[in-house]
């Protein structure tokens, strides 16, 4: 796995108030990975029900927590509020040039998740096909995070 720390980009996002520096904690990152795995299992179970929206959100949350785990190991945390999830792509996209496809799929997942969370009668909710694609994308992101956390963990 190729990783480029992108310190300049991270410093910029910290300076803009979109990220915070924190103490890296391997156990927190590992907890987030376990949560991501549980959410993937929930998404798989929910995919077999009539609740495609909740299945999609579970897959999305799995990917989101996996990306948070990567940042956590680096001593970085996304700030809450408007665009709090979008900053994950801003922070991590340049760091993983070989995984841009997976990270772009997270961007798509974020858009669909926002349509679910903030419904508009003119915008369709998640479909079963969306759920299947989200599950695959989330699995790839979780695997990336597992590898990154395993190889970059700190003893805190």
Image (cartoon, rainbow, N blue to C red):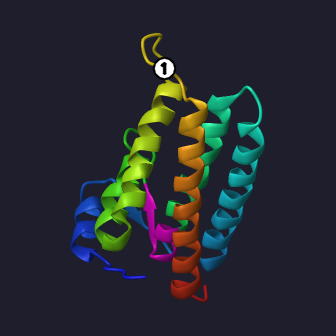
What residue sits right under mark 1 in the picture? Answer: 124
Residue 13 visible = yes
Q: Is residue 6 above or below residue 33?
A: below
Residue 136 x/y as whole percent: 56, 54
Is 39 left, or right, of 112 in this rendering? right
Residue 116 x/y as whole percent: 53, 27
Residue drawn at x 42%, y 46% as measured from the top left: 84
Residue 27 x/y as whole percent: 67, 75
Crowd band around label 1 with a 10 angstrom C-alpha radius: few (<14), some (14–19), many (20+): few
- In the image, the segment drawn in magenta is 70-78
Q: How many marks on residues?
A: 1
In the orientation shown, which residue stands out farthest toward the front?
129
Residue 24 visible = no
Query: Does the stretch in magenta take in 72?
Result: yes
Front-lying residue, 9 or 132: 132
Query: Does the stretch in magenta take in 47?
Result: no
In the orientation shown, which residue stands out farthest toward the top?
121
Residue drawn at x 70%, y 59% as measured from the top left: 35
Is 81 left, or right, of 135 in this rendering? left
Dividing the picture into quadrants, the one containing residue 45 is top right
Query: In the structure shown, which secondary structural element does the residue marked by tag 1 occupy?
Result: loop
Residue 82 x/y as whole percent: 38, 38
Residue drawn at x 54%, y 70% as measured from the top left: 145
Q: Is residue 15 above or below residue 155?
A: above
Front-lying residue, 141 or 75: 141
Q: Is residue 91 above or below residue 148?
A: above
């Amino acid at each position: 796995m190729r990783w480029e720390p992108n310190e300049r980009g991270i410093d910029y996002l910290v300076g803009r108030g979109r990220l915070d520096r924190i103490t890296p904690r391997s156990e927190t990152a590992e907890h987030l990975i376990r949560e991501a795995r549980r959410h993937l299992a929930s998404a798989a179970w929910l995919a077999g029900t009539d609740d495609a929206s909740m299945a999609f959100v579970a897959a999305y949350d799995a990917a989101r927590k996996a990306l948070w785990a990567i940042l956590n190991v680096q001593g970085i945390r996304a700030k809450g509020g408007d665009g709090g999830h979008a900053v994950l792509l801003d922070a991590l996209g340049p760091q993983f040039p070989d995984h841009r496809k997976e990270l772009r799929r997270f961007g798509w997942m974020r858009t669909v998740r926002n349509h679910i969370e903030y419904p508009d009668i003119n915008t369709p909710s998640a479909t079963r096909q969306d759920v299947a694609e989200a599950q695959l994308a989330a699995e790839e992101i979780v695997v990336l995070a597992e590898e990154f956390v395993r190889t970059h963990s700190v003893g805190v």
